[in-house]
Image: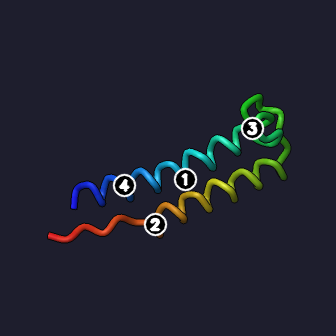
């Protein structure tokens, strides 16, 4: 039981870390960190991180007991 939970948690965390790493390599993200992004780039980043938040809500680990 504990091993299954650990594996599921590792899988979900790995997926989010991979997405965050890939995003950090984009020009849009680098501009936002340097505070040189326009409103369209900000809107794009808001949409992407909102999608990650929603994905985190729906990818859950079921606990019983």
Q: Estimate the spatial distance between the alpha carbons at disc 2 and disc 3, rounded to whole Å.
A: 25 Å
Q: In front of the other: label 1 or label 4?
A: 4
Q: Quadrant of residue 5?
A: bottom left
Left or right, 57 with respect to 42, comes to left
Which residue appears at 46% of the width and 65% of the height?
A: 57
Q: CA distance from mark 3 to mark 4?
A: 27 Å
Residue positioned most to the left: 65
Of tags 3 and 4, the one toward the viewer is 4
Q: Kindly report which numbered mark, 3 or 1, lies closer to the viewer in this rendering.
A: 1
Image point (22%, 56%), residue name? 2
Find numbered disc 3 in the image and state the secondary structure of the residue it sits on: loop
In front: mark 4 or mark 2?
Answer: 4
As helix, strand or loop, the secondary structure at mark 1 comes to helix
Q: Earlier in the sequence, mark 1 or mark 2?
A: 1
Give me the C-alpha separation between circle 1 and circle 4: 12 Å
Residue 56: horizontal and vertical position, in percent?
A: 49, 61
The quarter holding residue 55 reads: bottom right
For marks 3 and 1, give the CA distance.
Answer: 16 Å
Looking at the image, tell me whether mark 3 or mark 4 is earlier in sequence order: 4
Circles 1 and 2 in contact, beta carbons < 8 Å: yes
Q: Which residue is mark 1?
A: 15
Indicate left or right for 54 with 37 as reference: left
Name the residue that disc number 4 marks.
7
- Crowding around mark 3 (Cα neighbors within 10 Å: few <14, some 14 to 19, many 20+) is few
Residue 25 circle label: 3
Give the residue furthest to the top: 34
Mark closer to the chain start, 2 or 3: 3
The front one of 24 and 31 is 24
Rate crowding at label 1 as few (under 14), some (14 to 19) or many (20 or more) other CA atoms within 10 Å: few
Mark 4 Cα shell of 10 Å, populated few (<14), some (14-19), many (≥20): few
- The residue identified by callout 2 is 59
């Amino acid at each position: 039981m504990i091993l299954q939970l650990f594996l599921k948690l590792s899988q979900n965390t790995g997926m989010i870390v991979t997405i965050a790493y890939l995003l950090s390599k984009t020009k849009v993200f680098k501009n936002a960190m340097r505070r040189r992004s326009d409103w369209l780039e900000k809107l794009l980043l808001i949409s992407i991180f909102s999608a990650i938040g929603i994905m985190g809500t729906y990818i859950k680990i079921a606990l019983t007991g």
